Amino acid sequence: MEKENPSSNRYMGRNDSDTSGAFSDCNSDRSGEFPSSGWPTTSSSSFGGGGLHRLLVSYAVDYSHEVVRRLISDLESPSATVESQRRAAMELRLLAKHNPENRLRIAAAGAVGPLVALVSHPDPQLQEHGVTAVLNLSLCDENKTLIAAAGAIRPLVRALSTGTPVARENAACALLRLAQLDDLRTAIGRSGAIPPLVALLESGGPAGRRTPPPPSSPSSWWRRARRGRRILPSDPSSRSARRAPSTARWPPTSSSSFGGGGLHRLLVSYAVDYSHEVVRRLISDLESPSATVESQRRAAMELRLLAKHNPENRLRIAAAGAVGPLVALVSHPDPQLQEHGVTAVLNLSLCDENKTLIAAAGAIRPLVRALSTGTPVARENAACALLALLRLAQLDDLRTAIGRSGAIPPLVALLESGGPCGKKDAATALFALLASRENKARAVEAGIVRSLLDLMADPDSGMVDKAAYVLNVVVEVAEGRAAAVEEDGIPVLVEMVEAGTSRQKDIAVRSLLQICKESAIYRKMAAHEGAIPPLVALSQSASKKSKEKVEALIELLRQPRRTAGDSRR
């Protein structure tokens, strides 16, 4: 599900939540080493250049109350020049940057009010210093209530739109710090923070951009110990060795974690007080014939995020009539709009009450198309949404309808080439769909068996168990058994009996029993692969229920081999 990275809250068994831990490095102003223009370069500047002065000030631990009060006085004086105010604001900003005691001392001296006033100052540099000083003070929990009481929320929200790039990102980060107090989240949402945060999500700088983790080391393939048994090609260029990197569940954008997606996700996902009017306005933005793609993107993004964590919001959004417009976006030619539509439908589907509405709105065919045509995130979330709908009724007619809509081939493709979360969703959806015999044949035709065996033979995939259970469903039909044998599935299953976990051994025995019970030729192949010794060993430790299957399989493999009148059935 919507994992923006992926994580966390987990959609359909995936871990994907947006927590404040994602912003753990949001611990001081985002400007880093300030540009030389940020500090006056006059001779009155200590050491002439400002660099060493900034370093000394930022680490100062012994600034007296008199110094702090003088700086505050320079901010408040009616006769103070903008230049002197800049210097005072800069010193307070830097004093609060690294030292917790200074943050408390500055706030106790009465600096919060004057610094909050600077957040609305028309001078861009003064506004930036004010925003960033407020951010630095907010890093102490004791100061957060003081900052909110000084009326900082609305000026910070305005700075999201009117400030310099640094001021915008630091305003977002300051709001993030304040939003960690439950009673302030509602106030921030009501102050109009969402639209400028959406804008910042789309246009912010790359300061906090998330990057995917480096690819893992090459998989340690299971090696056959006897008679050159092959599980997977050792050639790293084989398709099973080319694992796609994890797809971030949040669409990669140029926004920073602080100035864009991170804080926006935090604020919107926890919003619980959105009124019916707000939801209806967002729906209207989606449906308006005169709406631009940009405005539709923002509206879809807000609905998507509103529905992400809050069950009440999911019900409210569906009841307001959003399902139809959001389903329509699933077929939109704009990739971002399609992705927002798919993911919003997924989020709404997490409430059982909404699933019938979503199915009735004709979501199945568009979601199936999105499996093939969408962005990587849209493809994975479409698979997850279909899985949610499958869990609605648990009825063959719905499974058959989804299978007839063409869902099987793109799900098999996602199983083969998707990210880790996409593979898991595809496997789970396929497992549900393959309860229908009609869909088993479609899956075999789409090449599911090769993909499943590749995953089963790769312990690093994290998919061994899931793939083995899906294969067990596939080999219930003759086409599946034939495909499993043709794709060298018997060696994989024998290896699993010998070296797998207890669960893997159990499901491998069940699959081998399905394959061998009606074909002497298949039994001969299994025996030739050395299946009997590990089965005998397993029979000594298996549970009573499993032992019956193990012994039945051993008996089958020890039967005399018929050479005539037998066929692969």
Image (tube, helix red, strand yellow):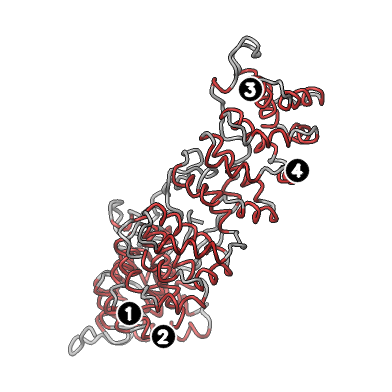
Mark 4 and mark 1 residues within 8 Å of each other at the beta carbon: no
Whichever of callouts 2 and 4 sits on the residue coming sooner in the sequence is 4
> Which one is nearer the viewer's eye here, 345 or 546?
345
Specify whether residue 481 is in view: no
Counting from the top left corner in percent of width and height, residue 478 is at 27, 83
Which mark identifies residue 146?
4
Viewer-closest of 128 and 375: 128
* Residue 481 picture location, percent across and down: 28, 79
Q: CA distance from mark 1 to mark 2?
A: 21 Å
Mark in the foreground, 3 or 4 = 3
Residue type, mark 2 in image? Leu
Sequence-first tag of 4 and 1: 4
- The residue that label 1 is drawn on is 475
Q: Determine the residue located farthest toward the top in the rendered image.
A: 43
What residue does disc 2 label? 395
Looking at marks 3 and 4 on the same chain, the residue that comes earlier in the sequence is marked by 3
Left or right, 457 with reference to 170: left
Q: Nearest to the eye among marks 1 and 2: give it.
A: 2
Question: Mark 3 to mark 2: distance in Å?
Answer: 72 Å
- Res 140 visible: yes
**Residue displayed at 63% across by 36% down:** 119
Q: CA distance from mark 4 to mark 1?
A: 66 Å
Measured Cα–Cα span from mark 1 to mark 3: 78 Å
Query: Callout 1: helix, strand or loop?
Result: loop
